[in-house]
Image (tube, helix red, strand yellow):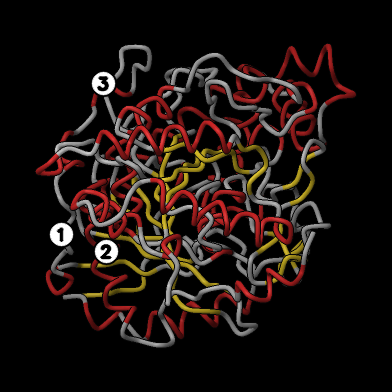
Amino acid sequence: MAELCDLTATELRREIGTGNVSPVEPLESCLERIDAVNGAVNAIVAIDREQALATARWAEKAVRGDDGNGLLHGLPLAVKDLEDTAGLRTTYGSLLYEDHVPKQDHLAVGNARAQGAVIVGKTNTPEFGAGANTRNRVYGATGNPFDPDLTCGGSSGGSAVALACSMVPLASGSDYGGSLRTPASFCGVVGFRPSPGVVPSDTRPVALSPFSVLGSMGRTVADAALLLAAQAEGNRHDPLSLRYRPDLREPLAPADLGKLHVAISTDLGTAPVDPSIRKVFAEKTAQFRHVFARAQERDPDLGPVHEVFEIIRGVTFVAAHGDRLKHHRDMLDTNVIDNTERGLALSAEDIAWAQVEQSNLYRRVMDMFDEVDILICPAAAVPPFPHGQLYVNQIGVEPMPTYMRWLAVTYGLTMATPAVCAIPCGVDGRGLPFGIQIAGPNGSDRMVLEVAHALETYFRDVPALARPVPDIAQLTTKGP
């Protein structure tokens, strides 16, 4: 019999709303699962059991008839350790903030809490989210739930692992170069990168930059959509969030796939992709491309996207970490130092060129979406690798010139600021989770979620495409 922690968030919310389940029960089940498997994977890194139980007991008393409570009433939620949680240790994965306990919630955390979420704990992340391998000098590495010696991806790796292991039904994440999508792919869960501004943030160092976004994660698309609806809200402290769309709170319905024209791209026309991933992607898409009205091989025109991404990301790192590099270099990890130094070496001419090229890239991709509804591509360019290896330095025979290049299949899309959902799509040749990205134009969040929901539903009945589940019993016996 499944434990309560194994139920989806939407199932739990329905049971809580009808009074069949007390909010205390799923929290206790989640805490038991954390105690059983977290030692093997190190996903949850800070926890306040007493406060979480107090919140769940309050939610138990506050259940109102006719389900008049918030969207997440009584649902356990884990928060990525880049987002402030009032009264709960928040380190950003950095020794500089090892003992930091915020007094206020981040905007998105506060929104979720206001909708009734029970904050269980924080999930591990690389320092300041820099890198797609979740490890830092505060908490160490987070292991993949299918093989704890391998990476879970990053930077929302702790959240992805916590979900895959049913430690929580919902978890928050953030995404710049693929930080929601890569760990979702490596761990067999759902990660949604919304359009800029859908989820408010008052902590971006450059408030008008659209590339870093907060998003949601779940074991199903409906769960990720539920959390997104609770996170989302217009807020005047985030100039991008004023475009918030209330339709995200409407119940999610699957799209009619038979009406869609879809572009399928193995590498976005420019991303290095491991030969094994190319093979698996071709095999997977062959099993579902017939469900669309038309599916064509087509790459977006991303132009000089690698140089554009490196320059714009470098500028962002100077804004966020330039002062830290100047005064606390010895306390920073390699990735933060590398990105910031690259940014400091740029000229005004470099930056202006990148901004112009990104604008042109964006417009070309939007033109493509006038001709196709959706773009589908792999969610990761390589299989999970050992977490002792900081990043991928070679794909096939191609050396990677920077520690970020192996993420081009995700950061290439970031530069076009689309809405993107990563969903599980069976396993690769090694039996490890495989994921795909479903992308739509900026502002098409609901449509992308509905397409992802419909594909997920179709995949459930196809063994080779269904979501894989880690062996919880094996993780329980592994220990720390």
Residue 37 vs residue 450, the one in the foreground: 37
Q: Which of the two discs, 3 and 1, labels the residue nearer the N terminus?
A: 3
Q: Which of the two discs, 1 and 2, labels the residue nearer the N terminus?
A: 1
| Measured Cα–Cα span from mark 1 to mark 2 | 8 Å
Which three-letter amino acid code belongs to the residue tagged 2? His
Residue farthest along the right direction in this orientation: 330
| Residue 461 screen position, x and y as percent | 31, 85
User: Which residue is disc 2 drawn over?
Assistant: 453
Q: Left or right: where does residue 248 sit relative to residue 333?
A: left
Which three-letter amino acid code belongs to the residue tagged 1? Ala
Q: What residue do we see at 26% from left, 33% from top?
A: 62
| Residue 145 screen position, x and y as percent | 64, 66
Task: Give the number of marks.
Answer: 3
Q: Left or right: where does residue 298 sit relative to residue 468?
A: left
| Residue 140 screen position, x and y as percent | 79, 45
Q: How many residues crowd mark 2 within 10 Å: few (<14), some (14–19), many (20+)?
A: many
> What is the secondary structure assignment of the residue under circle 1?
loop
| Residue 198 screen position, x and y as percent | 31, 33
Which three-letter amino acid code belongs to the residue tagged 3? Leu
> What is the secondary structure assignment of the residue under circle 2?
helix
User: Which residue is disc 1 drawn over?
Assistant: 253
Nearer the observer: mark 3 or 1; the answer is: 1
User: Which residue is disc 3 drawn over?
Assistant: 242
Q: What residue do we see at 19% from left, 41% from top?
A: 249
Task: Look at the image and tell me in which quarter the C terminus lies.
Answer: bottom right
Report whether residue 127 is seen: yes
Q: Left or right: where does residue 423 sit relative to residue 253?
A: right
Q: Left or right: where does residue 347 sit relative to residue 378?
A: right
| Measured Cα–Cα span from mark 2 to mark 3 | 27 Å
